[in-house]
Image (cartoon, helix red, strand yellow):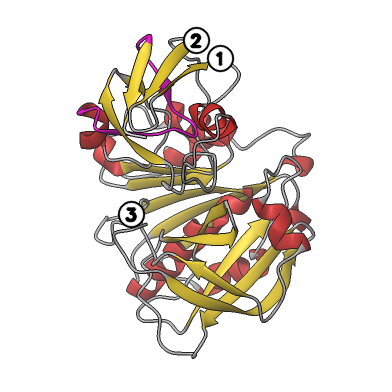
Amino acid sequence: MSENPSLRLRVRTINWQAPTVLSVVLESTDRSALPPAAPGAHLDLRLAPGLSRSYSIVGNQGVPHRYEIAVAKDAKSRGGSRFVHEKLRVGDELDTSWPRNLFPLDENAPLSVLLAGGIGITPIWSMVQRLEALQRPWILLYAARARAQAAYLDEIECLARATSVGRLLTHFDDEHGGRPAELASVLAQGSPGAHLYCCGPQPMLAAFETASAHWPAAQVHLERFSVAPGEASSDHFKVVLQRSRKTLDVPPDRSILDVVLDAGINAQYGCMQGSCGLCQTPVLSGTPEHRDHLLPDSVKAANQAMLICCSRSRTAELVLDL
């Protein structure tokens, strides 16, 4: 986040969007205008020392005076959603990044087919609102485990009843015997030039990648909540920390970051799931196995840097500038 100055924001309101989803509206401490946030943009929120999380901005086109995010309470939370649900209060002040966009909308596409699963609706809903404002054709599939758990559903259905350019499809697992949505049939409704978007839990993203495999790569876009699972190509490897003059063993069940922190090294980190970029570390030698979806492909290909919270090693040893 060092490429942009940080923002100091105050929590204006906190509201329930669903039984496990809170929406949080943030404004500048002096209520001045905020940097523009295009559809798909997110904020990196520094919730507490060593605790940073990334959340998509809901709506707010142009130059907004407020940002809205939505946070689902995750039973497997490593601190972020639990902090928002249990500790964040109206009036609290937070440091955040400027809006960053790794999931941009192509506003010129002849048709946009958008698939959202659960809290993945947050960037998708922003895209739908923008497409509607531009009067560009769209199809939205909104899937959730149950209708009551679908955040922003009332607003989305209201827009769907009024639109002349869009179409809403919904799928609630509990109304279909627990079965997930069939994505291939939705994508089949897209024209050859359509752009496809998906944000949701890992099983949905995997199904989306399979169903969209025959589409041109430039027309397929997805955003993950966290790093995709994968098998390490090296179960056990060593990291040499050049500046710290330490060599550490990294076992299969621990991340480089975990091992580094246990060794008393003051490494910067935040989300611990490959989405905030705070733990980006220069690679001096060796070949990383990148598991994030944040670093540019050019950086990965050149082995210039890696996110040590989630990525591993393809070689027996990595030398890091740490």
Circle 1 residue = 251
The residues tagged by marks 2 and 1 sit, at their Cα atoms, a distance apart of 5 Å
Q: Sequence order check: which comes first, mark 2 or mark 3? A: 3
Taking depth in this image into account, of 175 and 234 the one nearest to the observer is: 234
Is residue 169 among what the camera can see? no
2 vs 3, front mark: 2
In magenta, the rendered stretch is 302-316
The residues tagged by marks 2 and 3 sit, at their Cα atoms, a distance apart of 47 Å
Element at badge 1? loop
Amino acid type at mark 2: His
Q: Sequence order check: which comes first, mark 1 or mark 3? A: 3
Taking depth in this image into account, of 235 and 61 the one nearest to the observer is: 235
Q: Please say if the residues under marks 1 and 3 sit with CB atoms less than 8 Å apart.
A: no
Circle 3 residue = 111
The residues tagged by marks 1 and 3 sit, at their Cα atoms, a distance apart of 47 Å
Kindly identify the residue that appears in the image at 56 percent across and 14 percent down. 252
Q: Sequence order check: which comes first, mark 2 or mark 1? A: 2
Q: Residue 136 in the image: x percent, y percent?
A: 33, 65
Q: Is residue 27 magenta?
A: no
Kindly identify the residue that appears in the image at 38 percent across and 70 percent down. 37
1 vs 3, front mark: 1
Amino acid type at mark 3: Leu
Taking depth in this image into account, of 159 and 122 the one nearest to the observer is: 122
Q: Image check: 175 left or right of 245?
A: right
Which mark identifies residue 236? 2
Q: Residue 154 in the image: x percent, y percent?
A: 67, 69
